[in-house]
Image: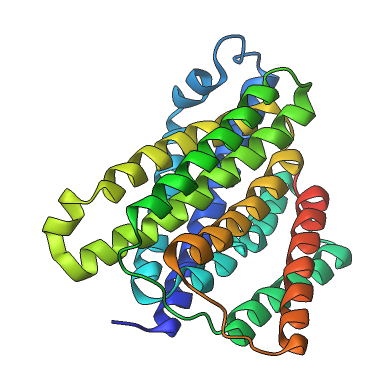
Amino acid sequence: MHSNLLAVFFALLSALTIAWGTVVRHRIAESATADGSLAGDPLWAAVRRPLWWAGTSTALLGYGLQILALGFGTLLIVQPILVLSLMFTLPLSAHYDGRRMNRSEIFWAGLLTVAVAVLVLLGRPSAGIVHPPLKSWLISLAIGAVILGALARLAKYLIRNERALILGIVTGGIFGYVAVLSKAFTDNTVHEGWLGLLSGWETYALIAGAILGTITQQYSFNAGALKNSLPAMTITEPIVAFALGYAVLGEKFQVNSFAGWATMALALLAMVVATVVLSRRGVH
């Protein structure tokens, strides 16, 4: 069943739950740093706290809602809406920090909302290929493994805030691939039922990618302030997903004029700038 309205609805629910899980896990990372419990492995320090499991479970629920949204709409509709998770992260973070969002944050939040609306409404993404060629998958996965692996290795030699930034980019890249695999997983389930779910390699690649992304995300949270890692992962994910949606799934924006593409480009630029500004100003 194809329904853009339901896709938008479940994508918004996904953005909300992912935002809460993000704030909880980062606050655990901050408290662990403050009380000195990061003397050992930062991931192990985090997972020993029950609240981390609550935040992670909420984030996983968000990924489940994302998959549900992809069952009703295209990746190019769902992915921009997930960027609005930042819209929910900001007030949640402000609440925990005991402060209010200022006028500047509200302005950039409004700009982000408008930019996402333009991408979805003007772009009117069309559905892609249900079963993309394996060759396309292998090439895209190989490219991602080389680039993201090199960045993760580079992060080991950087100082705290720079490490958080690079690991944020790696996290966003991994979840960009997870988003595309989620769409493939959903299509397999819808068209082939439980047999397609259990026999498709995309199911197991999705599980592995989600685990790897969650682990990398926790390391990025522990590496530095959320304002260093969150903008990178929030922007990298949709850009990678957009590229893979076009290259692998064959989804396309239905824009045919120069003015239309110019408007889409401005909306994408506005989304990137607003996300970076909001992340750095509103999250500490």
Q: Residue furthest front?
A: 135
Which quadrant, please, contains the N terminus? bottom left
* Residue for point 62% across, 28% down: 150
Q: Quadrant of residue 147?
A: top right
**Nearest the eye: 255 or 161:** 255
**Nearest the eye: 32 or 236:** 236
Residue 62 visible, this orientation:
no
Left or right: residue 96 compared with residue 182: right
Q: How is the image coloured?
A: rainbow
Q: Residue 52: x percent and y percent?
A: 47, 34
Residue 207 visible, this orientation:
yes
Left or right: residue 280 compared with residue 244: right
Residue 210 higher or lower than 224, as above or below:
below
**Nearest the eye: 21 or 78:** 78
Q: Residue furthest right?
A: 104
Q: Residue furthest left?
A: 195
Q: Residue 91: x percent and y percent?
A: 68, 58
* Residue for point 71% across, 78% down: 264
Left or right: residue 210 compared with residue 217: left
Q: How many marks?
A: 0
Residue 3 higher or lower than 38, as above or below:
below
**Nearest the eye: 231 or 36:** 231
Residue 246 higher or lower than 210, as above or below:
below
Q: Quadrant of residue 47?
A: top left
* Residue for point 64% across, 89% down: 256
Q: Residue 275: x percent and y percent?
A: 74, 59
Left or right: residue 229 compared with residue 10: right
Q: Residue 180: x percent and y percent?
A: 44, 57
* Residue for point 42% across, 30% down: 50
Which quadrant, please, contains the C terminus? top right
